[in-house]
Image (tube, grey):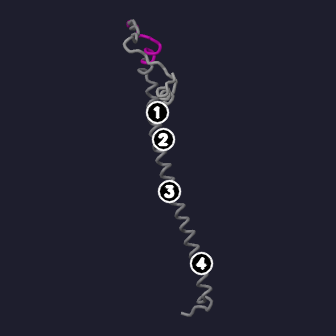
């Protein structure tokens, strides 16, 4: 096998090596970028599935809000409505108990450091 003389020269081998190094460098960068993109896609897919689960829960909640049972419960509690034949009983509220057992602490606005200063040096 006879190769041309310029293919055997040191300059050609050196240039071919440099081209190979550059190709490997750019290939490595491309692989790194693809890996980062795949990881980002996985994160976005996880977010999508999370939002789909929340969306399904909200759909079920909206469906519940549309039911007659929910509407009736809200009408009874918020609007004080009742069915025909029912009667409502109102109980009196208990009076608030007075706090006579423990005295309320006075609110001293002086700092702890000032109180100690006054204690040791007799200022009051």
Closer to the camera in the image, 97 or 48: 97
Please tell me in which quadrant of the rendered image residue 21 appears: bottom right
Determine which residue is flagged by label 2: 51
Do residues under tags 4 and 3 come within 8 Å of each other at their CB atoms?
A: no
Residue drawn at (46%, 25%) of the image? 65
Determine which residue is flagged by label 4: 18
Residue drawn at (50%, 49%) of the image? 44
For this orientation, the residue located farthest to the front is 121
Q: Residues within 10 Å of mark 1 (few under 14, many from 20)?
A: few
Determine which residue is flagged by label 1: 59
Q: Is residue 31 above or below residue 9?
A: above
Residue 79 placement (x, y as % from top left): 47, 13
Determine which residue is flagged by label 3: 38
Provide the secondary structure element on which disc 4 rests. Answer: helix
Residue drawn at (46%, 33%) of the image? 59
Q: Which residues are magenta?
A: 73-87
N-terminal label among 1 and 2:
2
Q: Nearer the viewer, mark 4 or mark 1?
A: 4
N-terminal label among 1 and 3:
3
Closer to the camera in the image, 66 or 32: 32
């Amino acid at each position: 096998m006879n190769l041309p003389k310029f293919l055997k020269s040191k300059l050609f081998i050196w240039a071919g090596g440099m081209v190979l190094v550059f190709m490997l460098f750019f290939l490595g960068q491309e692989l790194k970028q693809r890996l980062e993109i795949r990881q980002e896609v996985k994160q976005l897919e996880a977010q999508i599935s999370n939002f789909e689960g929340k969306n399904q829960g909200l759909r079920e909640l909206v469906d519940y809000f549309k039911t007659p049972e929910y509407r009736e419960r809200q009408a009874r509690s918020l609007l004080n409505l009742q069915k025909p034949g029912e009667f409502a009983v109102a109980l009196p509220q208990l009076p608030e108990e007075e706090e006579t057992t423990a005295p309320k602490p006075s609110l001293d606005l002086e700092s702890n450091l000032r109180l100690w200063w006054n204690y040791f040096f007799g200022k009051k």
